[in-house]
Image (spheres, grey):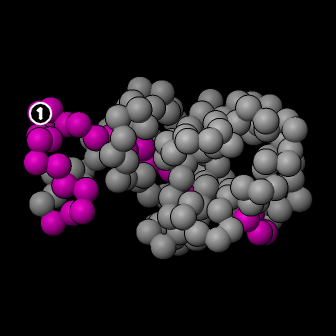
Amino acid sequence: MKWLFKSEPETFSIFDLKKSPGGKNYWDGVRNYQARNFLRDSVKVGDGVLFYHSNTEPIGIAGEALVVKSGYPDPTQFDRKSQYYDEKATPQKPIWYVVDVKFIRACHEVISLRKLEKISALKNMVVLKRGVRLSIQPVTESEWTAITKLPEWR
């Protein structure tokens, strides 16, 4: 399967992933139940990830990653010093999940949301639907192919 993961680049960018040890890191901080369910139940080792920079300019796809470890309890939910601490979560009954992702490549330039909106093959893509703010979203094979053939890739 293929996915789109959103992150604010000031918090964690495609380049932060690239600089992580071995180019790998866990995807933490998801605090939406539908996105959590994707991480816990659907995102699997070997799945491709479009790394999407949100809440910045330009908004859009900044690179590609690969899932290298499927869902497991988000350690930040148990850490009282973390902004993602959840007092209701326990190691016996975790609420939030993460996956590990590995850097594959960065785009030469961000594939902007405006550009994505102009590509007819992407007309039904979840990220282009009004009101959908999920940080983890499925991407179809045809959407993935259309995006990864664009000239912005390094």
Decide which of 126, 92 is in the foreground and name it: 126
Is residue 51 highlighted in magenta? no
Decide which of 11, 119 is in the foreground and name it: 119
In the image, 91: left or right of 4? left
Q: Position of residue 109 (x, y in %)?
A: 77, 69
Dividing the picture into quarters, in which one does residue 110 lie?
Answer: bottom right
The residue pinned by badge 1 equals 92
Image quadrant in which the N terminus is located:
top right
In the image, 72: left or right of 108? left
Which residue is at a point 54% across and 64% down the rendered structure image?
A: 55
Decide which of 26, 128 is in the foreground and name it: 128
Q: How many marks?
A: 1
Which residue is at a point 11% across and 33% down the rendered structure image?
A: 92
**Residue 47 visible in this rendered orientation of the protein:** no
Residue that extends furthest to the front in the rendered view of this protein: 130
In the image, 18: left or right of 96? right
Q: Position of residue 111 (x, y in %)?
A: 76, 59
Which residue is at a point 68% across and 56% down the rendered structure image?
A: 61
The residue under label 1 is which amino acid type? Gln
Is residue 86 highlighted in magenta? yes
Dividing the picture into quarters, in which one does residue 89 lie?
Answer: top left
Q: Magenta part of the protein: which range?
A: 81-110
Q: Position of residue 90 (x, y in %)?
A: 11, 40
Q: Position of residue 3 (x, y in %)?
A: 60, 39
Dividing the picture into quarters, in which one does residue 152 lie?
Answer: bottom right
